[in-house]
Image: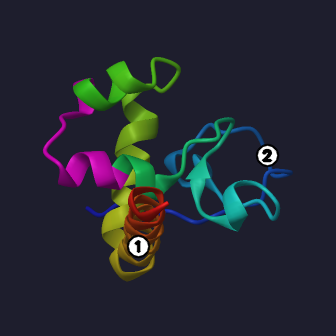
Amino acid sequence: MGILIHVKSETGTPANEIDSLIVKTPGVLGGRPRIRGHRVAVHRIAGWWQLGLSIEEIAEKHSTLGPAEIHAALAYYHLHRAEIDGYLAEERAAFATAASVSTTA
């Protein structure tokens, strides 16, 4: 049995199912997928997971997130890997550019 996640707008019904835990809101985090009720992007959770952090360690970084929200973010990542990996690549490139500018200034 698989998990199906639909991205809903912030104005949708209260989050009571896994498919309502991930939202995209224009003007919030650049419209990137995030955990409902938080300014924590799915790509941030996926990035930490890729670095080897456990669900518990990710929860320690964001004490307001519960395990279900973290699992929902990772499920969304696995269903939309190309999209989320693209956001991670953009972020890494921006950090690399900023680091090179600060070392040459």
Choose between 90 and 6: the one closer to the eye.
Answer: 90
- Neighbour class for label 1 at 10 Å: few (<14), some, many (≥20)? few
Q: Amino acid at mark 2?
A: Thr
Q: Which residue shows up at 35% across the image and 57% down it?
A: 75
Element at badge 1? helix
Q: Which residue shows up at 20% across the image and 55% down it?
A: 50
* Residue 67 in the image: above or below residue 105: above
Q: Tell me the mark number nearer the camera, choosing from 2 and 1.
A: 1
Task: Identify the residue at the far left of this view.
Answer: 52
Q: Which residue shows up at 75% across the image and 38% down it?
A: 14
Horizontally, residue 86 falls left or right of residue 30, namely left
- Residue under label 2, please give it: 13
Horizontally, residue 69 falls left or right of residue 74, namely right
According to the image, what is the colour scheme of the structure? rainbow
> Is residue 66 shown to the viewer in this render?
yes
Element at badge 2? loop
Q: Are marks 2 and 1 in contact (CB under 8 Å)?
A: no
Q: Position of residue 96 (x, y in %)?
A: 37, 66
Does the stretch in magenta take in 51? yes
> Is residue 4 shown to the viewer in this render?
no
Quarter occupied by residue 54: top left
**Residue numbers of the magenta segment:** 46-56
Q: Position of residue 89 (x, y in %)?
A: 37, 74
- Residue under label 1, please give it: 93
Horizontally, residue 104 falls left or right of residue 35, namely left
Quarter occupied by residue 88: bottom left
